[in-house]
């Protein structure tokens, strides 16, 4: 996906000169939010909440919308073969214990949210798929229908389940078993009532949007839902106000989460279409802001770049979501709050994280990635981030899952093997980057970004400044990373007598080969497509080491990384480097 050439920098919304990006304080807000969530979920187990979910259930649905998002026929066929495949895991159906499925992995959400119905529906053979769908659903109803618990009844998971039950009702409500049919319709009604009371308590961002989307779908498609629909539309608008920045980014700063939010709008559009009603104007307006922000983080192969633990989801998935939602737009090159800067020239694209991490309230799985970048040439990724932390789940050790969130897992500078923003033992983000100063200039010669953050100021006494210049033909990326001493009392610089250690890391794209030169100051890079790039530092030696990259399916792939080590004396240090395409 290439960028259209703007007539001028201003035409593309690019502000020349400096600006400052700040983040709200970390820590206390997250603790308060988590305590509130804990007590809220305790109330789910009370007889009072259970009685609130009781009531009459519908004998039918008003309509069954067509799911606008395609399922994975391969995963559907696996279900017919006795395996459930999702969230990066594969489990035999006869070993799947619905009652004990209580971890926080993507696989658990996949099962409890019934996303597998979409995959099963993609197979298309109703004679074979209906019995499997009914059997698995009956098992879930027996384990969870009458007992509200976490995570099966977490608001966003409940909404996903309700939506999938309704959208794929043909797999479930064609049953001749009237008891099963009645229990399923009662389950839909109980899910809707649960969402009525819990949607506003969901975590801000995509989870809260998902919960309110479930309320809207219930209001549209369960009989006598007019009041609920009005209630749901008002709640969804409030959720949009807390979920999105002014430039269309999402508060978690995860492009993958923003794509999920757009997918929700596609689902809502299909539900409104089923009732021959238009999508509300407020949702349409939000979508026009979200789309450019999302496309601004897309690389040359049409897939997402990897930020805040998200996966590099492929072009096909992105296009399916854009088609479902009816979204369109051009990539946002400079965001004022979303925080991602985009440089595009020739076939080259650079996406840089030029903002603090998300605030503690919404930073579940957040990453210490400030001033990291990804770089692609055409459809080939040259420099990446490891990504995938939000999807690691139970497939890897807790230490590796945390490692994917660290500064070292991103293509940037790391001081003393520490994070620019702390990752606390309980998984929350702690102190670190509080502000980023950014300057950007555009000219015929190329696009230049200079940014610096204060994440290492408190403990190490340095600001990290990064300068990137992408030449106008897209064949050369020049960079300089500096540690600038902080002129402030009250801190003690750590490090040995030789200075504070640091390392500059460039994680190379999948399949990119790297060979260091004899002098240790350069490396030749060869892409899978056969293109050659030359990487060189000025006056420093480098090493080629192994690294990991999360692919679009959440699988960890072994890749290579260039590591440039050094020591910064009290007066600071600077490393210049260049990546140049061979002629």
Image: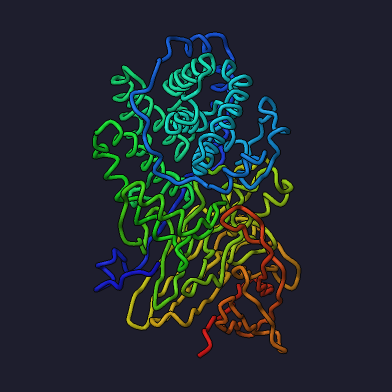
Position of residue 314 in the picture relative to residue 62 (left or right): right
Viewer-side residue, 372 vs 163: 163
From this view, report whether residue 213 is shown above or below residue 527.
Answer: above
Residue 576 sits in quarter: bottom right
Coloring basis for residues? rainbow
Residue 189 sits in quarter: top left
**Residue 325: percent from left, percent from top:** 34, 46
Position of residue 254 in the picture relative to residue 249 (left or right): right
Viewer-side residue, 137 vs 362: 137
| Numbered disc total | 0
From this view, report whether residue 107 is shown above or below residue 499.
Answer: above
Q: Is residue 408 visible?
A: no
**Residue 76: percent from left, percent from top:** 57, 43
Residue 232 sits in quarter: top left
From this view, report whether residue 361 is shown above or below residue 22.
Answer: above
**Residue 224: percent from left, percent from top:** 31, 17
Viewer-side residue, 578 vs 291: 291
**Residue 419: percent from left, percent from top:** 63, 56
Q: Is residue 95 visible?
A: yes
Residue depicted at 48% across the width and 73% down the height: 467
Residue depicted at 45% across the width and 33% down the height: 168
The quadrant of the image that shows the N terminus is: bottom left
Viewer-side residue, 364 vs 581: 581
Farthest residue to the front: give it: 127
């Amino acid at each position: 996906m290439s960028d259209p050439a703007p007539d001028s920098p201003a035409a593309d919304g690019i502000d020349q000169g400096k600006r400052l990006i700040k983040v709200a304080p970390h820590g206390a807000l997250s603790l308060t939010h988590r305590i509130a969530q804990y007590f809220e979920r305790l109330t789910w187990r009370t007889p009072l909440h259970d009685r609130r979910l009781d009531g009459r259930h519908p004998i039918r649905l008003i309509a069954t919308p067509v799911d606008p998002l395609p399922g994975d026929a391969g995963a559907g066929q696996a279900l017919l073969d006795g395996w459930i495949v999702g969230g990066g895991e594969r489990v035999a159906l006869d070993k799947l214990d619905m009652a004990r499925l209580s971890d926080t992995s993507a696989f658990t959400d996949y099962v409890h949210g019934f996303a597998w119905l979409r995959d099963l529906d993609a197979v298309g053979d109703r004679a074979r798929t209906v019995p499997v769908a009914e059997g698995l659903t009956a098992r879930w109803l027996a384990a969870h229908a009458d007992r509200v618990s976490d995570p099966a009844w977490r608001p966003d998971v409940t909404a996903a389940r309700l939506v999938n039950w309704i959208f794929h009702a043909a797999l479930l409500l064609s049953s001749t078993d009237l008891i099963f049919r009645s229990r399923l319709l009662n389950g839909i009604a109980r899910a809707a009532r649960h969402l009525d009371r819990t949607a506003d308590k969901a975590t801000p961002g995509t989870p809260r949007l998902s919960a309110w989307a479930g309320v809207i779908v219930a209001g549209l498609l369960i009989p006598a839902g007019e009041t609920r629909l009005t209630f749901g539309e008002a709640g969804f608008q409030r959720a949009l106000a807390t979920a999105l920045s002014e430039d269309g980014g999402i508060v978690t700063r995860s492009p993958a989460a923003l794509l999920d939010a757009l997918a929700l709008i596609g689902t809502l559009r299909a539900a409104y279409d089923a009732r021959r009603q238009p999508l509300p104007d407020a949702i349409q307006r939000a979508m026009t802001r979200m789309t450019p922000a999302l496309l601004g983080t897309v690389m040359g192969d049409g897939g997402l770049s990897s930020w805040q633990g998200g996966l590099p989801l492929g072009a096909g998935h992105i296009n399916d979501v854009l088609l479902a939602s009816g979204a369109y737009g051009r990539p946002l090159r400079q965001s004022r709050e979303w925080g991602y800067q985009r440089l595009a020239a020739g076939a080259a694209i650079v996406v840089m994280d030029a903002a603090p991490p998300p605030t503690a309230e919404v930073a579940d799985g957040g990453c210490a990635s400030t001033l990291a970048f990804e770089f692609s040439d055409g459809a080939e990724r040259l420099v990446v981030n490891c990504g995938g932390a939000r999807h690691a789940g139970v497939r890897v050790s807790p230490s590796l899952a945390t490692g994917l969130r660290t500064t070292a897992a991103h293509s940037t500078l790391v001081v003393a093997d520490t994070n620019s923003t702390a990752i606390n033992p309980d998984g929350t983000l702690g102190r670190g980057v509080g502000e980023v100063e950014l300057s950007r200039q555009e000219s015929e010669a190329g696009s230049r970004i200079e940014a610096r953050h204060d994440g290492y100021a408190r403990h190490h006494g340095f600001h990290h400044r990064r300068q990137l210049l992408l030449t106008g033909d897209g064949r050369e990326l020049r960079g300089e990373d500096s540690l600038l001493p902080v002129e402030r009392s009250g801190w003690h610089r750590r490090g040995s007598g030789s200075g504070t250690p640091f390392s500059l890391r460039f994680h190379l794209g999948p399949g990119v080969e790297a060979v260091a030169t004899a002098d240790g100051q350069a490396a030749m890079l060869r892409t899978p497509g056969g293109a050659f790039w030359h990487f060189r530092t000025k006056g420093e030696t480098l090493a080629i080491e192994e690294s990991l990259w999360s692919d679009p399916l959440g699988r960890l792939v072994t890749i290579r990384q260039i590591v440039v080590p050094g020591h910064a004396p009290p007066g600071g240090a600077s490393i210049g480097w260049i990546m140049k395409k061979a002629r």
